[in-house]
Amino acid sequence: MFIKIENLYKKFGHVVAVDHVNLEIKQGEIITLLGPSGCGKTTTLRCIAGLEKPEEGDVIIDGKPMFSQGFVPPSQRGIGMVFQNYAIWPHLRVFDNVAYGLKLQNLPRTVIHEKVEEALTAVGLSGMEKRYPGQLSGGQQQRVALARALVRHPKVLLLDEPLSNLDAKLRERMRFEIKSLVRRLHITAVYVTHDQAEAMVISDRIAVMETGKIVQLGVPEDIYKKPANRFVADFIGTTNFIAGSLVEVQLDKGKAYLQTDFGRILCTLADSFQVPSDSTVQASIRPEEIEIIPSATQKENVFRATIAHRAYLGNFLYIFVTIDNTLLRVQVPYNLSQKEGEEIIIYLNPEKCMILP
Amino acid sequence: MQRGNLLISTVLWAVVALFIVYPLSFLLVESLKNAETQQYGLQNYIDFFKDPYYLKTFVNTLVLSLLVLLTTTLFGLPLAYMISRYRLKGKVIFTALILLPIVLPAYAGAFSLIILFGKMGVINLLLMDLGLVAKPINFLYGVHGLVFVQSIHLLPFIVLSLSAGFTNIDPSLEEASEVEGASGIKRFFTITLPLATPNYLAGAVLVFLWPFTDWLTPLIFGQTDYLPSISYINIAYHFTDMHRKYMGIVSVVVSAVICVSIFLLSKAWVERKKYTSLSKGTTLEGRIIYPPILIQIGSYLYMLFIAVLVLLIPVVLGLSAFSRRWVLQPFPTYWTLENFKLIFIETPGLLKNSLLFSGTALLFGIAFGLPAAYLITRTHTTGKEALDFIITLMLAFPGIALGVSYLLAFWEGIPLATHWIIMPLSLFVRRLPYFLRMAHASYLQLDISLEEAAEVSGASKLYTFFTISLPLLLKGLFVGVVMFFIMAFQEISTAIFLYRGGWETLPIGIYLNWHRGMEFGIAGAMAFFMIVIIFVLLLIVAKIGGGILGAAWGSSGGRY
């Protein structure tokens, strides 16, 4: 393991920011800490950088402990970091911003020039060396920050919401650029974001965090398809929650019947699921997993629904349907013929209908 | 509403023209007049710069300026860093304390240091009693004494502006340098200090220019060979000697020109260096470091040292105020309230005058400053930059130049100088920036959309101002009011030229009592009384809006 986070615990006053987090990151892996604001993802990252000192636990980078045996200051960790607001020094030209860390290593001038040139070219900024940060656009400043973080060829790159200040188009492009750059340089990267789409695109694995803990760690597909709990299902993508009480649990098959306001549905139990004492639970099904069928061919999990709203989103439609008083969001092809107020028949696939803890 | 703005602008410009431009042009014209031929030309200036004596005073003043700036910077830099970066207990009280010398009159500091460090002062007497020295050590009388006194007086300017500079730096800029491999000292000199430089400069220029405006401190220490002091002596004592009078006027103009041009240069430089704001949504507090225990102890000791130095002034003045014949003894032996009885019962006029003049000046200041702040921050009226500029310039303008020009301009022609209104008028003009800057700073902090929301809801500009803007500005304005009052209350440089019998203020009373010689106790009592008033006002300011004060004084660099 290249980076090992062991039992990390950090609090600010009485607020626990990171609550005994364990995480192992392989060399060359891009891992994302994903979660809403205040979940502890940035604090975890800052502990890896050494910008925060944890109360307990250790961070081990390339076999070297950072906290347990004396504190290794950020300046001695040899990491690269991209800050949320870029932290480009306004009083230094682009060249001097990027060359800053190299100059501290007392490298010969020619080497510094070469390396800065290489880094600036990699991020597409060659020719901008003489500019001051104030003369650059937000996207260009972001690239300077990236070049500065990469110029020393750090073994670890930390990125703290690096794209959150960019506009939507540029943000999308930079996701791919950062990913290919990090891959090409074989850097181990830890990426912090609250944007689940960004996390999906950029990461090999995602660690979803909630209130200082990692609640799920896995590849993007697993996180989306097999959310560990309701929080993850809700935070990653969009989903429908259907409340009800368990009436018939078949633990051996991993299935159960759920009695809801509009009828009985067969659902799949999540891996870690345990039956609660009052047996009221919620099932989650994503809008694109709800199927529209021409006629009621099966008996189970088929319901008549009324279209309450149609929302056109270009390549697909969102329709909001009501079954009795329950509102569900369904993603359908854009050429759906039924109008608002008309009736359709929907099928809730038991495999996709997950009862989550 | 365009027409309303134009009206405000016209009235403000009329005031500026009548009370700033008109008298100052008089001064300039007078300095060009030849004493014998009554013709106008550059002869006075040529005489001035050819005379080795005046050239010497010029060089002396310049050297003094540099030494004071160097000293305050050396002592202020660590102090500002401790205040703005370290998490230390008692920082708020300490910050209020080190603000004290800004508002204390410079002469008060000079008196107390004479009592303490003079030839027959406490320290020398103690040293001689102990047999450590045979003859008294000259602590004060010379350039070193001036550097000592003026550095204590001006240290707050450096500390305030530097700590504002440090606080304004986005924490991530320093963190980034740490991640890039820079530790401690290296980070401070490559990132922190350069980023704080524009703020530092805003304070440093005021410090540098001070010796070009302070005529009284050198005189108290028996030093006449400084530009403002010799101006004062030439004009106040040698008005019958035409050559000396005109040399005085020329030296006043020279100091004024130096002040204005250095102020301009530094402003231009700061403008150019002002870094565009890159970061959004960072903490207002700046970066906070928990220092290691040794550095913590060192910081407390250093802060204590500065605090003791600052507190010496009121303590020594207090001792002399409550005692009699504190001469040739290391400590007072005879305690009395006689001094206070004298100033309250026999000459209550001084206090009454001070309150009346400062109060009236304050009314003028608000009536002018509030519309001016509105015009400068909220409108696009042409010439508003020039207005702001002229008013800000008064910060660096020597009081002596203002006093002399008022005397020249308002004697004949517009004979305002025969009426006591000239006193509050001159105070108003001299201290104008103190209220305006606060008003300006609070206006900048007030989100314009709050006012726009009121207008969209149907309120007129005037109604919006009184129901939305004014209540929200109140705190900052109050700080401005108190600061203005303090600075008007302790003013002497301008008033000394304009007062006539019966118009003496408390500071003039202090000066006259010192001047007459043996009335040290009374002068001390007056100064102590003033300090008590000022300190109470200052506590109110620190309590209400220390942050606003910092914003107004250190804001020239902006946030990055």
Image (cartoon, coloured by chain):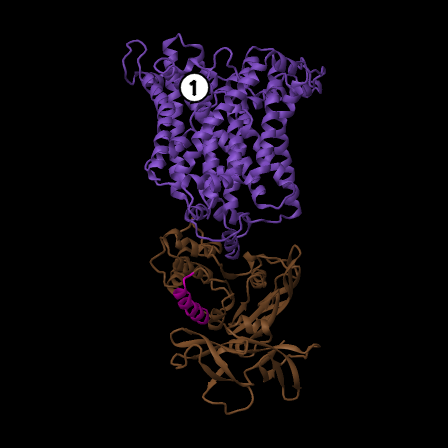
Chain colours: A brown, B purple
B499 over A3 or under it: above or below: above
A271 over B221 or under it: above or below: below
Residue identified by numbered label 1: B403
Query: Percent from the top left, x then y, of residue B276?
Result: 41, 48
B514 over A257 or under it: above or below: above
Please identify the quarter of the rendering in which residue B121 is found: top right
- Local packing at callout 1 (Cα closer than 10 Å; few below 14, some 14-19, many 20+) is many
Give the main secondary structure of the magenta stretch: helix
Q: Residue visible at 60% across and 37% down? A: B543
Question: Would residue B327 be seen by someone viewing this image from the given angle?
Answer: no
Amino acid type of disc 1? Gly
**Magenta residues (range):** A166-184
Query: Percent from the top left, x then y, of residue A24?
Result: 59, 71
Q: Chain of mark 1?
A: B
Q: Residue visible at 52% across and 56% down? A: B181
Residue closest to the eye, A78 or B199: B199
Residue closest to the eye, B199 or A105: B199
Q: Residue visible at 52% across and 32% down? A: B71
Query: Percent from the top left, x then y, of residue A125?
Result: 36, 60
Query: Percent from the top left, x then y, of residue B87?
Result: 62, 46
Q: Secondary structure at mark 1?
A: helix
**How many marks are shown on the rendered structure?**
1
